[in-house]
Amino acid sequence: MIDILRRTFGVLVTTLVIALVVFALVMGAAVAMPDPLPEPTPGASSVRRCPDTGCTSSYCHAENR
Amino acid sequence: MSNKIRVIVDLTILSALIAIYYPGATGIAVHEWLALGVGVPVVVHLVVNWDWVVFMTMITWRRRRDESRVDYIVDALLYVALITAGVSGLMISQVLSQAVGWTLAVDPLWRPVHSVSADIATAFMIVHVTLHWKWFVRVGREHTGGVRVDQT
């Protein structure tokens, strides 16, 4: 019985540790990846403007993400 | 645990994982609940074989290549892929999250992680079953009147 508990504890702890590592890696990757600029609303100008400066260049967007 | 029960547990896991891999066929509710439920036989499978896992973890990097080492690496990658599919599946779940009252702001990255890890887990599952196929055949023969089989 103690042997089964020992093995079960090992399985659960190992699984939990791997799950936490996976969670941390994916969340870290999600934070590191830049968010895409929002799509323009219907009826609005199709030209995307940087929210900070009003600049329409894609370079400007990348700089202000 | 007898070989007969071990085969039943293993075939239950295999059948469930095949069904889980096709959410379009089962529906998303069955997909999510079955994925949660298969955790129980997977834990049983791991508990039964845990001493082998610990033993191989300790010796695997000291030994030269052999069949057990290939088994161990395949099993380890399968284990990580299954956990990744499970964690990402929980993060993007629709039915389970409603059932427990989660309202998570889910990053869109979880969806491709779930899809890719499920594909990888399925590929390693096929390799895992193939590597242990002889054991399944021997146990099958034992229970159809053939020779007796050891526990490995």
Image (tube, coloured by chain):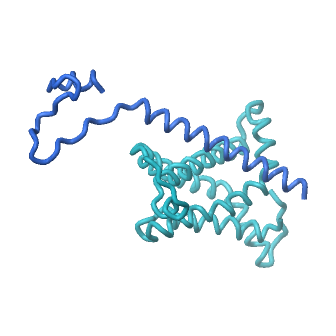
Chain colours: A blue, B cyan
Residue B36, given in percent of the width and then of the height, sits at 59, 62
Task: Using the rendered view, name the quadrant where residue B109 is placed.
Answer: top left
Q: Is residue A28 above or below residue B108?
A: above
Residue at position x 84%, y 54% in the image: A5
Residue at position x 72%, y 50% in the image: A12
Left or right: residue A51 versus residue A31 is: left
The quarter in which the C terminus of chain B is drawn is bottom right
Residue at position x 71%, y 36% in the image: B65
Residue at position x 68%, y 57% in the image: B132
Left or right: residue A55 versus residue B16 is: left
Residue B35, given in percent of the width and then of the height, sits at 56, 62
Residue B74, given in percent of the width and then of the height, sits at 63, 46
Residue B45, given in percent of the width and then of the height, sits at 72, 59
Left or right: residue B126 versus residue A41 is: right
Q: Is residue A50 above or below residue B138?
A: above
Query: How many numbered marks have been drawn onto this rendered protein structure?
Result: 0
Q: Residue furthest bottom?
A: B145
Residue toward you, B94 or B117: B94
Q: Is residue B49 above or below residue B1?
A: above
Residue toward you, A55 or B17: A55
The quarter in which the N terminus of chain B is drawn is bottom right
Q: Is residue A34 above or below residue B120?
A: above
Residue toward you, B11 or B35: B35
Task: Using the rendered view, name the quadrant where residue A38 is placed.
Answer: top left
Task: Using the rendered view, name the quadrant where residue A23 is placed.
Answer: top right
